[in-house]
Amino acid sequence: MSLPDIIRNFDRVPADLVREAAQYQPAIFADVAGRRGALHGRIRPLHPRMKLAGTALTVEVRPGDNLMIHAAIALAQPGDVLVVDGKGDQSSALMGTIMMNACRKLGIAGVVLDGAARDSLEIDEMDYPVFSVGTNPNGPTKNVGGRIGHPVSVGGVTVYPGDFVIGDADGVVVVEREKLAGLLPLAAKKVKDEAARIAAIQGGDTAAKWLTAALRSAGVLKEGETL
């Protein structure tokens, strides 16, 4: 039996875990998840100060058509992040100020577009978090069906509905829903360890202790040789 194009019900990361996870940088999660989960760098915030954290409501559209994004907005729950597989198309914008105002009013936590946006100055003034591959003043069509609540490929990463999504000036990281709780203690330790290392550097301990061994392993230095 085939699945419907619109899957309305799926498990989401609990709100308390979203709040706890939101305190960390996306880079921290990428590190503790094994250097994975980061969307391609083409997907960037419209302004560097923009941040988002929430649960993925996945949308797949045909390039340049936003019909299913309107449907997703109508189905979204507060705290959701719209994660849109727009096929990386930049020939027209998928969303602009009107839709972003609706998203904010409904409590949608932000938007991630593997596609273009428009009205970027107005969205900046709204201070509503939007991550996209760029901008284009051309508007979309509203004619072609797509899918909601299915796994999508966005920025080279497979995103499942309900996954944790977090973004800042560096970009966006997605963490699988089932793995987030287990990564939170690792994220806390990573932050503590990095703070200790920075303090040591500021105290004059600038040497990377692992460097010599890594250079030997890579064949750059011979055994017994140092920099």
Image (cartoon, rainbow, N blue to C red):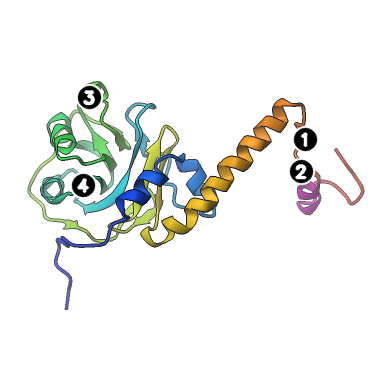
Q: Nearer the viewer, mark 2 or mark 4?
A: 2
Q: Which residue is mark 4?
A: 63
Q: Is residue 32 above or below residue 199?
A: below
Marks 1,4: beta carbons within 8 A: no
Q: CA distance from mark 2 to mark 1?
A: 8 Å
Q: Which residue is more in the foreground, 15 or 213?
A: 15
Say whether disc 4 or disc 3 marks the residue closer to the N-terminus: 4
Q: Nearer the viewer, mark 3 or mark 2?
A: 3
Q: Which residue is mark 2?
A: 211
Q: Which residues are magenta?
A: 213-220
Q: Nearer the viewer, mark 2 or mark 1?
A: 1
Residue at (44%, 52%) from the top-left corner? 37
Q: Quadrant of residue 172?
A: top left
Say whether disc 3 or disc 2 marks the residue closer to the N-terminus: 3
The local crowd at label 1, few if under 14, some if 14 to 19, many if 20 or more residues have their Cα within 10 Å, is few
Q: Position of residue 170 (x, y in %)?
A: 45, 35
Say whether disc 3 or disc 1 marks the residue closer to the N-terminus: 3
Say whether disc 2 or disc 4 marks the residue closer to the N-terminus: 4
The local crowd at label 4, few if under 14, some if 14 to 19, many if 20 or more residues have their Cα within 10 Å, is many
Where residue 18 is drawn, which disc sits there?
A: none
Residue 192 located within the stretch drawn in magenta: no
Q: Which residue is mark 3?
A: 126
Marks 2,1: beta carbons within 8 A: yes
| Three-letter code for the amino acid on which mark 2 is drawn | Leu
In what element is the residue under mark 4? loop
Q: Which residue is mark 1?
A: 207
Marks 2,4: beta carbons within 8 A: no
| Three-letter code for the amino acid on which mark 1 is drawn | Ala
